[in-house]
Image: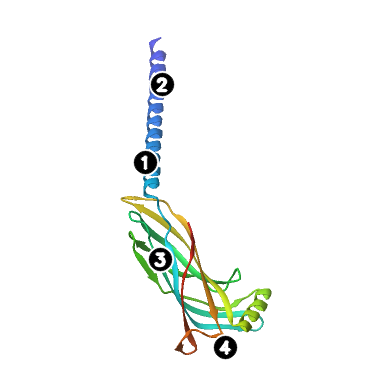
Amino acid sequence: MSAPEDCGKHGHKRRELFRRIFAGILIFLLIALITILLVWAILRPTKPKFVIQDATVYAFNVSSPNLLTSNFQVTISSRNPNDKIGIYYDRLDIYAVYRQQQITYRTEIPPTYQGHNEINIWSPFVYGTDVPVAPYNALLLSQDADTGFIPLMFKIDGRVRWKVGTFTTGKYHLHVTCPAQISFGPKQNGIPLGNNAFKYQLVRSCSVSV
């Protein structure tokens, strides 16, 4: 008669042990989470600051009926304003947009790590060949060309991680939008580089969301 009772006691002890282990894990995770949140609140991480420095236009041609070929080289700087937080740029893709429509392919910027208060500068080529443009945008593009100014946006999509000491967070979405108004025709104000290429000094802050 003692065997079933012993089995019941052993089963109860195992369940009690599992409950204690589970409770210990939960407490550990809770303490770790609270610690991370406190460190995060104390350090107050600030998103990186992006600036578009210049843009060189090598090609910007519309062919019939609504195909656009373009080739740019843009210089963009990124600064990490944090004193104690590093930033991993795991993936960055840059492309050009005209009136909410992407008009170039995506160009990948090599992954990099940005230390405290560091500045990184990239000069990628952004281009597209015979990219279809929406009919209404083709009409607006023609009108903008007549006025001499083309409102463009260079956008960056990517993934970043924050590094605090030895701790590294998970990946966050990064979205950057840089305005670049390009002039054409008689209002051309770029610096000629030869072969119909013009360089425009912009130095404009970009909007950043993480």
Labels 1 and 4: the sequence-earlier one: 1
- Residue 85 x/y as whole percent: 35, 54
Q: Which mark is residue 35?
A: 1
Residue 29, percent from left and from top: 39, 38
Question: How far apart are the alpha carbons under marks 2 and 1?
Answer: 36 Å
Task: Tell me whether the residue at label 2 lies in contact with that at label 4, contact meaning CB atoms closer than 8 angstroms.
Answer: no
Please give the name of the residue rendered at 51% of the width and 84% of the height, measured from the top-left corner: 189
CA gap between label 2 and label 3 equals: 60 Å
Classify residue 130 as left or right of residue 7: right
Q: Earlier in the sequence, mark 1 or mark 3?
A: 1
Whichever of labels 2 and 4 marks the residue nearer the N terminus, that label is 2
What crowding class fits label 2: few (fewer than 14 Cα within 10 Å), some (14-19), or many (20 or more)? few
Q: Is residue 57 left or right of residue 44?
A: right
Circle 3 packing at 10 Å, graded few (<14), some (14-19), many (20+), is some
User: Looking at the picture, which amino acid does disc 1 mark?
Assistant: Thr
Tell us which disc is closer to us: 2 or 3: 3
* Residue 139's disc number: none
- Mark in front: 2 vs 4: 4
Q: Which residue is mark 4?
A: 186
Residue 181 seen in the figure: yes
- Of all residues, the one furthest to the bottom in this rendering is 195
**Percent position of residue 28, x then y:** 37, 35
Q: Mark 4: which amino acid?
A: Pro
Q: Amino acid at mark 2?
A: Gly
* Mark 1 neighbour class, 10 Å CA radius: few under 14, some 14 to 19, many 20 or more: few
Q: Which mark is residue 11?
A: 2
Separation of residues labelled 1 and 3 (CA atoms): 29 Å
Give the number of the mark in front: 4 or 3: 4
Residue identifier under label 3: 78
Task: Check the image and report above or below for 203 versus 80.
Answer: below
